[in-house]
Amino acid sequence: MTSTDVRNEAEDSGPSGYAAARLRLLQEGARSGPPRRSALAELTDEWLSGLFTAGAEGLRGVSLVAVGGYGRGELSPRSDLDLVLLHDGSDTAGIAALADRIWYPVWDLGLALDHSVRTPAEARRTAAEDLKVQLGLLDARHLAGDLGVTAGLRTAVLADWRNQAPKRLPELQELCAERAERQGELQYLLEPDLKEARGGLRDATALRAVAASWLADAPREGLDDARRRLLDVRDALHLATGRAGDRLALQEQDQVAAELGLLDADTLLRQVYEAARVISYASDVTWREVGRVLRSRSVRPRLRAMLGGGKPATDRSPLAEGVVEQDGEVVLARAARPERDPVLPLRAAAAAAQAGLPLSLHAVRRLAASVRPLPTPWPAEARDQLVTLLGSGRPTVEVWEALEAEGLITRLLPDWERVRCRPQRNAVHVWTVDRHLIETAVRASEFTRRVSRPDLLLVAALLHDIGKGWPGDHSVAGEIIVKDVAARIGFDRADVTVLSTLVRHHLLLVDTATRRDLDDPATVRAVAEAVGTQGTLHLLHALTEADALATGPAAWSSWRASLVTDLVKRVAAVLAGDDLDAPEAAVTAEQERLAIEALATGSPVLSLRAQTEPAPEDQPSGDPEPLGVELLIAVPDQPGVLPAVAGVLALHRLTVRTAELRTLDLPDGVEGAVLLLDWRVSAEYGSLPQATRLRADLVRTLDGTLDIAGRLAERDAAYPRRRGWIAPPTTVSVHPAASRHATVIEVRAQDAPGLLFRLGRALEDEGLRVRSMHVSTLGANAVDAFYVTGTDGQPLPPDEATTAARKLEELLRA
């Protein structure tokens, strides 16, 4: 039956004919989606127009108007009919009779009706008082009667909306936020409300209203398709249940999936989540743009008055190479060339997350359109930027979603596609698989001070459930996937082994602690054999807690935490053994040459050279991969070397990636002691300074003519304070059993310019001698171990070591 046939049957048979035609239309299996909604709206238009015409004889200045969803032509099988009867107020009795002629047949058929009878002036006044009414009128569509009355109202309502947009849009945003707080996020709910939840049909309608204001517009790519998919699901829900409603209950999902021709309920939910994610992201971008426009409108008149009418320039503050902040967003620098810089997406994302700022839509789309794929394995910078992004706490979520909205995440991590928007049918879980992985990384970022390798913790958090996209035990599947992903990211074989162990056994501690007898030695030995080392054990402990906290409130408790901690202590005792100092590396010819020159001149000597590693085994003909720049410094042994070198590097905006400090044993016949600092550094921006400038500033610092502390304090005071993520507190701990020859003080802190300078000066002020130092900067985390002795060259007494650690912690937390 064609649409014309259906309309003719409705017209010929009155209400009963409309009911029959409506039923026939809804039962047509070949017609669904937008065509059926349009046909249903058209059929209803014809019927209501007939009712209007039959009752409006002799009336003038009257029209029947569809508003809201019906006005948009989006009639689902059980949708309300939103109608307004407009009139000029000249014949109230005739209008009342006409209303009865229209409303009662609708009610008689059991159709839900939202109706009103108003003059255009009354409609405008009501809209001014009630935002929901105004939103409905924005979609007003003429059905019957005086077209001029309808057109006049539409014109007036749109004009009112645009004139009042600076006031009404913040009200609409607040309304959306309150609704999201009540209903939750559609993209994560197991029983979502397709209309009211965040990312649902209400939000899609709100975006249409923003666009109608001419103040801002939503990113349109994929938005119409997302709205269509949610409407299709609502249609199927109405047909499956035979009643109106927007909540997709668990018991109805299989039937709705079958109605849509989908494989199963999980496929249905995944499609719903994908659509909701598009709408949610579009909402975030749109409301951010609305805020920016409203701020600029309020500030610009004052600025113009102050500047004599000139247009103020927009500040652009550098955040990283090729990345700047502009107007509260992270954008690409004018000189950025994404097509030549494959690390730029990760660098921009890490900078945005660290600053607590959103990535601009334009920047993400430009990156998606032009950036080259990363080589395999990734360069070291890409790996570091990923770790920094993952370790940035709560801002990571918004930045990750921006990358994912433009397909950049699946380009970086192809295995992500299998877990993207994947539902978890477990009441304990509150997130989809992919969001749970990001939430676990966010939680893990709070525990980076508890482990020696924060980078491995964060990457394991991101990937621990990656196997849920495959059949079978997800831990077993995940172990296989992670071996490949970690190698592709650029981790060495030892780190790949640790990561695969963490993923394979990420449930081991909590399962064992809650399901096994911890007093049975076999239980503890089995866990010890699985984890292998104390370092892996502590990583697994942190991952276990982060995973549980990211799962939901029911997944972690003080009882579970105490059981897991008890298990970890028992396993650590089994794994403990003699912990001898690692033998010092042999002195190279280059190091010996620098040391002898430093003794001969009585001043620092240094060299800068690029570090490389051989090409991967599967690329024997490839070029070596650059690892950074190695800075070798030899200095005659004297007080203040460590803070002096660290301060000079900070002054020249050099980031320390790794560092070692030790006293060299020189050949027989060469008198004097030389400190050797072997550091790997990189420039925050631009190119490295010349070695001669570094040496000159180091000489001046050591002889007291360059006030490093003052210069760094001035720069820090001028640096703009950002509203980014609040880092977890610094921890300083003493490890008395780590060495027989020195006291090991370990500092775990947020990496920052001048951190090593402050630490070195604090140790000097305490009268401690640094025997050796091992610095590791992993993403945004610094893990620095100082092997210190007293002036007598012996390890510190326990009370002195505790006092020194406490003072260091107080200094860094100040």
Image (tube, rainbow, N blue to C red):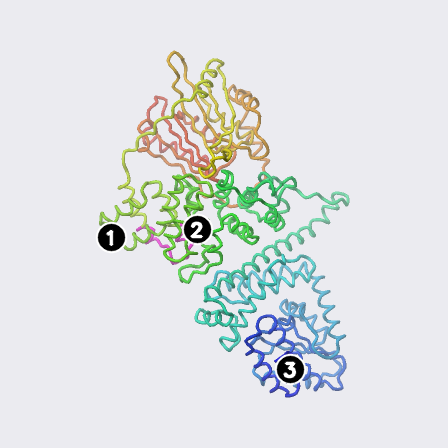
Pick the front one: 514 or 632: 632
Using the rendered image of the protein, determine whether residue 723 is visible from the camera's viewpoint.
no
User: In the rendered view, would you say 154 is above or below 686?
Assistant: below
Residue type, label 2: Thr
Residue found 41% across the figure and 17% down from its top: 673
Using the rendered image of the protein, determine whether residue 585 is visible from the camera's viewpoint.
yes
Q: Which mark is residue 5?
A: 3
Residue type, label 1: Asp
The verdict on residue 493 being magenta is: no
**Disc 2 marks which residue?**
440
Pick the front one: 1 or 730: 1
Residue found 40% across the figure and 62% down from its top: 426
Tell me the mark number nearer the camera, choosing from 3 and 2. Answer: 3
> In the image, residue 83 lies at what x, y percent?
65, 76
Residue type, label 3: Asp
Pick the front one: 441 or 480: 480
**Which stretch did the figure color magenta?**
546-563
Are the two marked residues, 3 and 2, in contact with CB atoms closer than 8 angstroms? Answer: no
Q: Earlier in the sequence, mark 3 or mark 2?
A: 3
**In this rendering, would 25 be left or right of 543?**
right
Near mark 3 (Cα within 10 A), the count class, few <14, some 14-19 or many ≥20, is few
Badge 2 marks a residue whose secondary structure is helix
Near mark 1 (Cα within 10 A), the count class, few <14, some 14-19 or many ≥20, is few
- Real-space CA distance between mark 1 and mark 2, rounded to the nearest whole angstrom: 28 Å
**Disc 1 marks which residue?**
517
Are the two marked residues, 1 and 2, in contact with CB atoms closer than 8 angstroms? Answer: no
- Real-space CA distance between mark 1 and mark 3, rounded to the nearest whole angstrom: 75 Å
Badge 3 marks a residue whose secondary structure is helix
The verdict on residue 562 being magenta is: yes
